[in-house]
Structures are given as C-alpha cells and as structure tokens.
Image: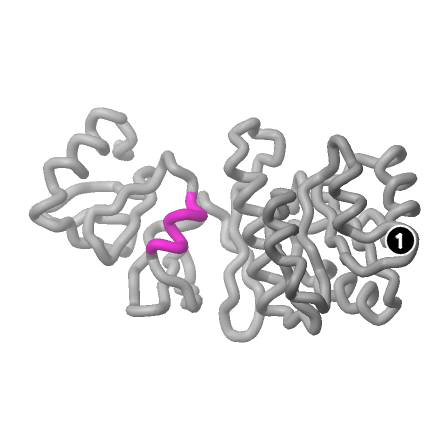
C-alpha cells in the first residue's frame, strides 16, 4: 500500500490542459490529486482549506497570472510551472520553482518533473513523507520498486538492471542517476558498475559478495573500504 503521497493541485484556465494533467497524475502512484482550479483566486481559497504539497501552476491566466500569484503568496507549496510560453522560464526559477514544463507536455517529461518533486521531498530529511520506494519506467510501464526488495543494481551503459529477490528490472537510467534516488544509508558501491544493498549480503568470499542466489564482484581498489563499511557497521547478516 502506498503511504504518504504528495498531495497536489492543478491550476489552469484551459479545460483540455486540466484534463491532460489530471490523467498524468492518476498514473503516478506517489501523487494524490486533491483539487483542480481554473484561476489563482480559486487556488487561494483551496490553500486555506487543505494541506497541499505541490502545485502544477499555469502562468497565463485571467485576473492573476501564475507569476503574480507566486510573487504575492508569502508561504506557498512547492511549484511546477506549466505553460506554453518559454520566456517565463528565468522568472520562474528566480521564484524557486521545482521545474518548468512547456506545453504540449509529454508524459515522459511530466514524469521527470514528478520524480524531481519526489526527490526534493525525500531530501528534506524530516521523515515526514517516509518514501521507501522508487518508480522506474520498464517495458512501457511505470514499475514500483521498494528499496527493501533491492539486492543490487548493475550498470549496463545507459541502462541499469535492478535485481530483486525474484526479478530483474531494466530501466533507461545511468547508475549515477539511480544512486542519487537511493537512500544514503544501506547501499554501498563495491565496484564502479554495481550498487549493493548491505543488508542483503550473506557472505564475503574472496572478491565476491554473496547475496542469496546472486554474486557481485568487489573491485580490488575498493575492497578495504567495502569491508570496513560492512564490518564496522555490523550490517552483515549472520
């Protein structure tokens, strides 16, 4: 069961745009759409009644533009701008938005922005969100991978293979990009092409880490560091 989703709101004066964004949000399990607004005044009222983490905010709207709303709101949720006008990008980033989506917005680009928001909330360190999973795109679908199910990750040029207890998930990511989305504690890199969940290591044999049915090599240049992390932290299973 997904817990502690990011509560979000769409604000756009175009019905087609609202419908499109709403459909995208429904596909992403860590987002929870709690409201749809046609203008900034409706949004202002909604924020007084509900807790909102993230706003998908259009810029060109009647009465009050998205930029004007941000400039006048003393304490607003995090924002991803959605607009057909490229010239507002610099102003948007001056106002500390998480991302800037140019219409028409593809699902791939929307997913990238949503993951950026996910990463931002995870990085806050308050534990309030408590995310313990990641979504990756594999075989034309979004697949949820719980961190505690990962045994190790292997780099395959511009792809990575994520190994769990019962399957192998291949996704179009670099190993570096995936490492940035994993918890800081609990994973080590014994080799430039691998990342391993320390609590899945059952034994060390020569230059190999044994993880149930899997074996992962340890680089001779990193062996001392890897051994120290495993033994000193007492994370090796007995």
User: Callout 1 environment at 10 Å: few (<14), some (14 to 19), or many (20+)?
Assistant: many
Vertically, is 198 above or below 136? above
| Residue range (magenta) | 176-182
Depth order, front residue of 20/218: 20
Residue found at x 82% / y 67%:
19
Report the side of 59 relative to 171 (left or right).
right
Residue 101 position, x and y percent, is 64, 62
Residue at (25, 46) in percent of width and height: 189
Q: In which quarter of the image is residue 140?
A: bottom right
Residue for point 82% across, 54% down = 11
Tell me where residue 148 appears, x and y as whole percent: 45, 43
Q: Nearer the viewer, residue 45 or 211?
A: 45
The correct choice, above or below, for 176 with respect to 78 in the image is: below
Q: Name the residue under label 1.
A: 39
Report if residue 83 lies within the magenta region.
Answer: no
What coloring was used for the rendering? one colour
In the visual, does 39 lie left or right of 81? Answer: right
x and y percentages locating residue 116 in the rendered image: 55, 51
The image shows residue 212, relative to residue 121, as above or below, that is below
Q: Quadrant of the C terminus?
A: top left
Q: How many labels does the image show?
A: 1
SS at circle 1: loop
Question: Within the image, what quadrant is residue 95 found in?
Answer: top right
Say whether residue 122 is left or right of residue 193: right
- Give yes or no for residue 178 being in the magenta stretch: yes
Left or right: residue 139 compared with residue 46: left
Q: Nearer the viewer, residue 203 or 137?
A: 137
Q: Position of residue 155 (x, y in %)?
A: 29, 62
Q: Does 29 sit above or below residue 51?
A: below
Residue at image coords 71%, 64%: 24
Frontmost residue, 95 versus 117: 95
């Amino acid at each position: 069961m997904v817990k502690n989703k990011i509560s979000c709101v769409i604000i756009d004066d175009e019905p087609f745009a609202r419908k499109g964004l709403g459909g995208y949000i429904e596909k992403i399990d860590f987002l929870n759409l709690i409201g749809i607004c046609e203008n900034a005044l409706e949004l202002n009222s909604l924020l007084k009644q509900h807790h909102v983490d993230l706003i998908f905010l259009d810029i060109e709207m009647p009465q009050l533009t998205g930029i004007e709303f941000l400039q006048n709101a003393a304490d607003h949720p995090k924002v991803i701008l959605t607009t057909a006008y490229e010239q507002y990008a610099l102003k948007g980033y001056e106002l500390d938005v998480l991302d800037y989506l140019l219409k028409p917005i593809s699902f791939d680009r929307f997913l990238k922005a949503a993951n950026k928001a996910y990463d931002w909330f995870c990085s806050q360190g308050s534990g309030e969100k408590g995310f313990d999973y990641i979504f990756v795109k594999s075989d034309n679908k979004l697949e949820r991978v719980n961190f505690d199910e990962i045994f190790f990750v292997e780099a395959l040029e511009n792809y990575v293979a994520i190994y769990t207890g019962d399957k192998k998930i291949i996704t179009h990511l670099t190993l570096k990009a995936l490492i940035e989305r994993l918890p800081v504690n609990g994973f080590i890199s014994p080799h430039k092409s691998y990342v391993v969940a320390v609590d899945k290591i059952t034994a060390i044999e020569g230059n190999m880490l044994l993880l149930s049915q899997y074996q992962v090599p340890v680089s001779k240049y990193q062996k001392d560091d890897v051994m120290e992390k495993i033994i000193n932290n007492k994370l090796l299973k007995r």
